[in-house]
Amino acid sequence: MEETSVAQEIVKFAHKTANYVGEIIDRDDRRVLVKVLAVLQHPTQGDLHSSQDPDVVIFHERRALSYTEKVWVPIQVAQSYTGVVPDYTKSLHTALHAEMERIDQLKRWSELCLEKLNILRNDYGA
């Protein structure tokens, strides 16, 4: 009996606050089941309903989906991916460090804003 080669359908997809590369392994009318192969953007931390608020009741720690973890996503969220699929571990580390750098830059920006606002407060006599 002759084996039939089935082409992999590799996609980039968003899930919650992160972006991934994965392989479609099943589908229905509205969704595709994707097996995670790489992380492109690490999930956002904290309460998604209170963006950038550190004083929420529960400040969530969000982990990236695991290698080969399967997740259903809406069909319209999965976009064809034609690039080289990065190594999962390397992509996870790259995404994590990029998110940490983004947060560090935001922190430094906030600190400078507070410094300038304090100068203005003194100028305003407030």
Image (tube, helix red, strand yellow):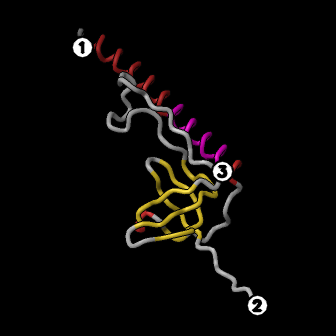
User: Image check: 34 left or right of 54?
Assistant: right
- Looking at the rendering, the stretch of residues picked out in magenta corresponds to 92-105
- How much space separates mark 3 and mark 2, taking CA atoms? 39 Å
Q: Earlier in the sequence, mark 3 or mark 2?
A: 2
Q: Amino acid type of disc 1?
A: Tyr
- How much space separates mark 2 and mark 1, taking CA atoms? 85 Å
- How much space separates mark 3 and mark 1, taking CA atoms? 49 Å
> What residue would you read off at disc 1?
124
Q: Is residue 93 magenta?
A: yes
Residue 60 horizontal/vertical position (percent): 45, 32
Q: Secondary structure at mark 2?
A: loop
Above-or-below relation of 28 to 5: above
User: Image check: 10 left or right of 120?
Assistant: right
Residue at the image position 73 percent from the left and 86 percent from the top: 3
> What residue would you read off at disc 2?
1
Q: Amino acid type of disc 3?
A: Ser
Q: Nearer the viewer, residue 27 or 60?
A: 27
Q: Secondary structure at mark 3?
A: helix
